[in-house]
Image (cartoon, rainbow, N blue to C red):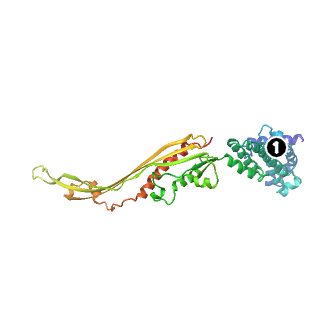
Amino acid sequence: MNLQITAWLLVLTLCISCSPGAKIEKRYTADDKIVFELIERLKKNANDAEAAKLLPQAYQQAAETRKSINKDTYNNMNEGDRWIEISKQLGVAEKLYSEIKGSAVLSKIIPDPWNPEQRIREAKLKAAEEYYNEGVSYLNYNNRPYARKAYDLFVKANNAYPNYNDVRSLMQQAKEMATIKVVVRPVNYYNFGWSYWGFDKDYLQYKMVQDLNSSSSYQHVRFYTDRDADAQRIRADKIVELNFNDLYISPVYRNEYTISRSKKIQVGQTKSNPPQPIYETVYATVYVKRLVLQSRASLECRIYDWASGNNLLSDRFPDNYTWKEERARYTGDSRALEPSDWALINNNSGFAEPGRNQIAERLINNCYNQLISRIRSGVTFGD
């Protein structure tokens, strides 16, 4: 390279690296940046003689740097990862190749650019091989922590080189071994079956399985109903037991009570000077009919390890609900009544009593929502 070209390339490198608006790929070398800059100049002006003169030598230097990359270049990186980095570095050369081949002007200047496609394929294949072999070594330990590492490595292998060897089968095997199986048993509804409370199935058991499986809170954990676990011959690692140790809905209690009202009201004024107000006390009686239904529930949950019996969670989640309806009539002078009396007198709800099943569902859901929030925020299923 003569001194004129060397000096020009040095100035161009400094200009590009100092330019605050330049968008530079993080893997571009100084040589790459110069080549891309020259390419851009020629795209804008095919008659740029200086750029055409500098491009072949600048490209050759950038290409030789990429060709010399090998596994020793990144020997400080983990196996597999180093080959992925090599493939990405070669990707810069591939981009240069595409730029040149995609332009008639550039192809005349550099008629035979280097195509790194085969080298990239080989690097990805080598990455998949190293990830795969390391994953197999972890899988052979035949325990959950190493199975998780094996799964991650098999995923990397498949991403590097899709369907490498039998990697998909091993991914599934590792995932199965890495997954903690949690079985949710049917709910005990306080000595009654779920059908007693009007449910056509034990929806709470299925709801918990669905909610926890769809949660992003748990990796490598899968929840099953007891029926699904039996059908798939799954051995549980953890067990969830749900029991309503209290679920009570009272009959509707009816009673009546009266409220006596009196109020002083001005009915006139004296003829004195100045005049004085004249008051009269008026009276009314309000007759109130009241309906009250009280209910309560307490959901007990125990989550424990099947092998050791140790608890992950053991607690109760209570809820109370009181339904009340009142209406009234009155006798006497309406002027004695308060706004609260009028609210009862004008109540036209018709005493629509809620159904037992409706209240049971409300209680059960409220208890369940407390429980599921507690599980998501404070229960760790992993070992």
**Above or below, comparing residue 240 to residue 343 in the picture:** above
Mark 1 lies on a secondary structure that is helix
Task: Give residue 94's position: percent from left, percent from top.
Answer: 81, 51
Residue at the limit of the structure toward the left, as seen here:
272
Compare residues 91 and 325 and report the one nearer the observer.
325
Kindly give the residue lying farthest to the top in the view shown: 76
**Amino acid bearing label 1:** Asp
Q: Nearer the viewer, residue 320 or 338?
A: 320
> Who's the residue at 21% across and 52% down the image?
260
Q: Quadrant of the C terminus?
A: top right
Query: Dot 1: within a 10 Å radius of its alpha carbon, few (fewer than 14), some, or many (20 or more) residues?
Result: some
Quadrant occupied by the N terminus:
top right
Q: Position of residue 65 (x, y in %)?
A: 85, 43
Q: Left or right of 252: which side holds 25? A: right
Q: Is residue 232 left or right of residue 99?
A: left
In the picture provided, is 267 more to the left or to the right than 1? left
